[in-house]
Amino acid sequence: MTVVERTRQASAAEVKALRQPRHDLVHESEPVVDDDGRWTWSMTSGPFDHYTRSLEVASEGGDRLRTVERTEFSFAVPLWWPYLLPLLKRAIADTDRRPRRRWWWPREVVTAETARLVGTIGTIGTMAGYMGVLIGQTITFAAEDFGVGDDVQANTLAAARIGVLLSFVFLRRADRTGRRPLIIRFAAAAIALTVATAAAPNLYLFGATQTLARGLTTGLLTLVTLACTEEVPASSRALSISFATLTTGFGAAVVVWVLPLADLVDGGWRLIYLLPILFVPLLWWLSKAMPETRRFVAADATEAPAMVNWRRFALVGLAAFVSSLFLSPASQLRNEFLRDDLGYSAAGVSAFQLLISLPATAAVPIGGILADRLGRRWVGSVALAVAASALALSYQLSGPGLWLAAMVGMSLSAAAVPALRGYQTELFPTRARGRVGGMLDVLAVSGSALGLIVVGVLSVRWDDLGSAIGVMVFGPLLVAVLIVLFFPETAHRELEEFNPGDPRLDTATNTATSTHR
């Protein structure tokens, strides 16, 4: 339980304002006044498991009154609440109770179920982030252990993308059974397959287990994004994707932190695949706390239509495919470039990845805030174009120039994610989002696989990995133009505006109103 207590000298007008029920962070009930003149409010709706506020007023002479305001609350966001607590305590003590958007919280009052869902899936996103980047971060060490070259590595990375067909098949079930059960099952299966990879005797079985695990983590990340955008208010969808991106990035960063284990002993990369055993008790606990998204519950209850706008799908799918032609090899083959071309050790690779990723951590929420306030299209397209150019340039450099270009590219690509990722869910109806997400994953992974194959062939032919990656930069540059010219602006608009067949949520009562017959 957290307590915020503040004593003030206030005028009669200020006391009157303090005695009004809050409707900014929380919806408060009408006050109850006890025999001692103490006013007390409880919560009718808000992001807390427990909440009460009390106010005592004593005369100090003149026109000034001494007030003691005490608020007790328990934040409903699991695990991540310590990061928001200082900001939340300051907002609760603030005398300005007007409903408004803070950079870290929506303008609308969110429910405890929403807060709990976002916090829970953020933690599962961390698991997915760890398992999703394992093959890209460790294949250079596994390949050395198994005695294979760059082209085999690239082909293995490309083949691992076939696993997306697994998530494509099962993601359809998210539109029938819900997001929650599929998230839990995908996470559990991915953990089992990741741990099994540690025992792989050759690159073929290494690739086979990672093909299945990578397919599940791809689907898991799609479900995490879907649940975030489906649950939160219109004013903060990009901000919620920022949170999911940060937690996913945290999981990916953990891989980089433990990467030196690959140099610790022969076959040390296998230890990195065993660590997800620690996720098992955490996943069990999270499965008990995770609710279903309100929009799925409402759409399922009213049997809302699931018609897909195929023009929108074609636009989003083309963007996913073409951008992946460059972004995947630029990310997946970075460690090989550092080790093979520049002679970095495992510890050096780890230090490089960590240091260039630090600014990207700040860029993610900044990108989300800008996308929510200025709009998705320009923020996303500009960030994507500059990021791709900087990443391509980084493969032509060494020394400080390499570090600077990679840092700029990583930061701006991270800033583009909250602006652009939401298009995969915002433009499609609730009862089709899982199916559409699976199809878009297939397109994105197909572009990724093709990009890796082309880069692998060109790098062997030219004996130059950097140039092979550089020629693929046309992909994200083309996507940036497509976004500006053809994509709709979705900021500040409820999902039901794009999908009028879905039941409209009443944020005040947390219920749904049918808009179709």
Image (spheres, rainbow, N blue to C red):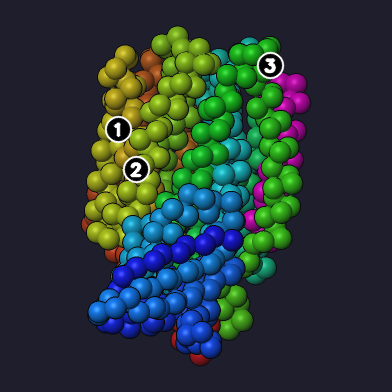
Residue at coordinates 41% horizontally, 64% vertically from top-left?
Answer: 6
Residue at coordinates 32% horizontally, 48% vertically from top-left?
Answer: 366
Residue 422 relative to residue 161: left or right: left
The answer for how far apart the CA atoms under marks 1 and 2 are is 10 Å
Mark 1 lies on a secondary structure that is helix
Residue at coordinates 34% horizontally, 61% vertically from top-left?
Answer: 102
Please provide the residue range marked out in magenta. Answer: 181-205
Pointer 2 residue: 363
395 up-or-down from 113: above or below: above
- Magenta: predominant secondary structure element? helix
Say whether residue 191 is magenta: yes
Q: Position of residue 204 (x, y in %)?
A: 69, 26
How packed mark 3 is, by other alpha carbons closer than 10 Å (few <14, some 14-19, many 20 or more), is some
Quadrant in which the N terminus appears: bottom right
The answer for how far apart the CA atoms under marks 3 and 2 are is 35 Å
Pointer 3 residue: 267
